[in-house]
Amino acid sequence: MSEYKLTVGLEVHAELKTKTKMFCSSANDPDEVRPNVNICPVCMAHPGTLPVINKKAVHHVLRVGTALGSDLADFTEFDRKNYFYPDIPKGYQISQYKYPLVSNGILNGVAIERVHLEEDTASSSHEGSEGSLVDFNRAGVPLMELVTKPVIHTAEEAGAFARELQLLLRMLGVSDANMEKGEMRVEANISISKTDELGTKVEVKNLNSFRSVERAIAYEVERMTKILDGGQGEIVQETRGWDEGAQKTFSQRKKESAHDYRYFPDPDLPKLKLSEIPEFSSDVLRATMPELPWEKRVRLVREYGVKPENAEVFTADKVLGGLFEDAVIAIGVDRPSITLIENYITSDLVGLMKGSDSVGGVTGHTLSDLINMIKAGDLSSRGAKDTLALMYSEGGEPREIAEKNGFIQKNDIEALKKIVDEVIFANPTVVADYKSGKTALLQFFVGQGMKASKGSGNPGTLKSLFEEALK
Ligand code: MN
């Protein structure tokens, strides 16, 4: 048990979805596998070239700021962040220092410091026999950097924040934010302290999943506690990497401070007065906001009575959420039907999907037809499950599938009476037990009746027929 208080601030970089790069017209294509094809003299830093600001990228960041309830800058400018590394062809990265596009705001209860716009670096690889290689396809791709205030106090809170941010970026359509593809990259500034004053922080990089964000923070708490309690000297302010295999952080380099980067306004780029651009006005930005994750969760619960955990599923999972809403539109405003849709998606269909992200041949329309058949008594729950399985694997109309496969529930009393007689005839000892007072055996008879009707009998009808016959 640690008596130290953990404090974490997160820095999240996200590649923005745009047609072209941040300052030139080279394509921004994260799926390009051939190295060094989406490049031009500007993003290769040839002398005499000039950058041009990508308006769409600015718009994306302003939309994020609007969703976070942040302050949007009126005046903004780009700065040069100077450092020397092969992945940065100009010898500096164009970023924002003094005047970020977005300040303040809140997400998932975590206060935001700023969100600014910059350009991504090239990607370098140090593996293979050819020595180090650099691919400039990514150089100059628009990159959003979001910095939280140091207000996170548990690893889980950090993970939850990152998940909510990913969802927000996707719902806004500003980034695909796949962490495993490096489209969203999280760094955690971590410190522990016994007082209100923050301890020495380390910055942990290479966190490629939500799980590694949480694991790395937990690991650092343990490592730092050991240093402080074990008298093993002091915590060094540094940048550490995360070793996924070993589930450990490791020292990378002594942390630079801001003055090492010699920031100064980029003289090649115009300063921006955002109020001069109509579509960047906060009124327009607010009016064009899509539904945000936290709004959607509340609406699903309030309008449809969806269980909170399922509202989370339908918000986080675009495909399941879309199917749910399509089926609801097809079936109309009827809470019991909507609850059936909710349950068939989150239990039966999710079971059929086995972790894939496709709902197979099921559409909102056919799902709503299936629910209507259940409500009309045409399908037992067994028959509905079997029908859904075929809708999923082969597609098609539930009525056709159910008719073709003999799943339609028999409400034909004469046919069911015959089954009841057969079951009673075949089970004389159970009948005797039932008649001697073990009335719970009624369930056994209904089960046998369902079996004899191959699942097509209506269990309610069977129940009353058995009760009648066994009087
Ligand atoms: Mn950055």
Image (cartoon, helix red, strand yellow):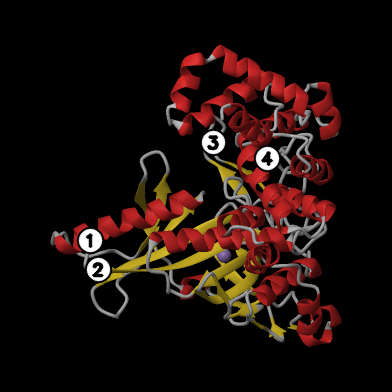
Return the residue at label 2: 4
Q: What element carries label 2?
A: loop
Return the residue at label 3: 131
Return the residue at label 4: 357
Question: Could you tell me residue 141's position as x and y percent?
Answer: 70, 57
Q: Residue at x 78, y 64 (%)?
A: 49
Which corner quadrant of the image does residue 46 belong to?
bottom right
**How far apart are labels 4 and 3 at the CA level?**
39 Å
Q: Can you say which quadrant of the picture contains the C terminus?
A: top right
Question: Could you tell me residue 143's position as x and y percent?
Answer: 66, 62
Please state which amino acid type lies under the numbered disc 2.
Tyr
- Viewer-proximal residue, 354 or 443? 443
Please state which amino acid type lies under the numbered disc 3.
Gly
Which corner quadrant of the image does residue 32 belong to?
top right
Is there a contact, CB below 8 Å, between mark 3 and mark 1?
no
Please state which amino acid type lies under the numbered disc 4.
Asp
In primary-sequence order, the first of circles 4 and 3 is: 3
Above or below, comparing residue 250 to residue 150 in the picture: above
Q: Which residue is drawn at 70% across and 54% down?
A: 336
Circle count: 4
In primary-sequence order, the first of circles 4 and 1 is: 1
Q: How crowded is mark 1: few (under 14 residues within 10 Å), some or many (20 or more)?
A: some
Is there a contact, CB below 8 Å, between mark 1 and mark 2?
yes
- Viewer-proximal residue, 294 or 345? 345
Q: Is residue 100 visible?
A: no
Q: Which residue lies furthest to the top in this view?
A: 426
- Viewer-proximal residue, 373 or 430? 430
Return the residue at label 1: 225
Q: What element carries label 3?
A: loop
